[in-house]
Amino acid sequence: MKAMMLLTGNGALVILTSYEKVTTPSLLEKLAAKGIEKFIAYEIPLELAKQRYGGHFGTVMGDVHETDDLRVLDFNGDRAFRMFHFDELGPPVAYQSDAAKAA
């Protein structure tokens, strides 16, 4: 499982995913289905995400209505953005779909 912060047009969000990379086509399809077609992603060390989110992390992991390939840990952009320092995050990965380029 990986934790990632996505900076999108609507703000920051933190996701959990079983995909190795945020640019895996299947994950990009799931994000696009949620209206996310352009973002900058940063990997968050999983243990750090567990520590910062505490019991909420366990709740999200135990939600049977979500799948392991995409779980939203935090959709409150302000909180998600303030939760981590840039020096705690992995290198940025920028992504923009062809549909986002055409818009």
Image (cartoon, rainbow, N blue to C red):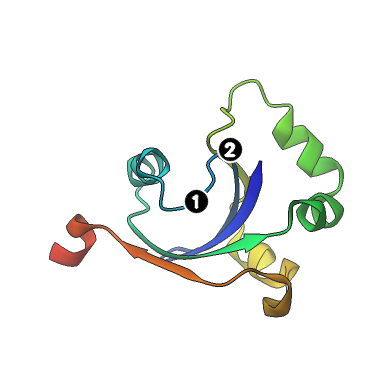
In which quadrant will I find the N terminus? top right
Amino acid type at circle 1 is: Lys
Amino acid type at circle 2 is: Ser
- Residue 91 placement (x, y as % from top left): 57, 72
Q: Which residue is at a point 26% across and 57% down the rendered structure image? A: 97
In which quadrant will I find the C terminus? bottom left
> Is 45 on the left-hand or right-hand side of 16?
right
Q: Which residue is at a point 44% across and 63% down the rendered structure image? A: 10
> Is 34 on the left-hand or right-hand side of 92?
left
- Residue 3 placement (x, y as % from top left): 65, 51
Q: Is residue 81 above or below residue 31?
A: below
Evaluate if marks 1 and 2 touch, with contact meaning CB atoms under 8 Å apart.
no
Farthest residue in the top direction? 64
Q: Is residue 38 above or below residue 64?
A: below
Q: Residues within 10 Å of mark 2 (few under 14, many from 20)?
A: some
- Quarter assignment of residue 100: bottom left
- Residue 85 placement (x, y as % from top left): 72, 76
Farthest residue in the bottom direction? 87
Q: Is residue 102 above or below residue 54?
A: below
- Quarter assignment of residue 61: top right
Q: Which residue is at a point 77% across and 42% down the rendered structure image? A: 57
Q: How many marks?
A: 2
- Residue with the mark numbered 1: 21
Mark number, residue 18: 2
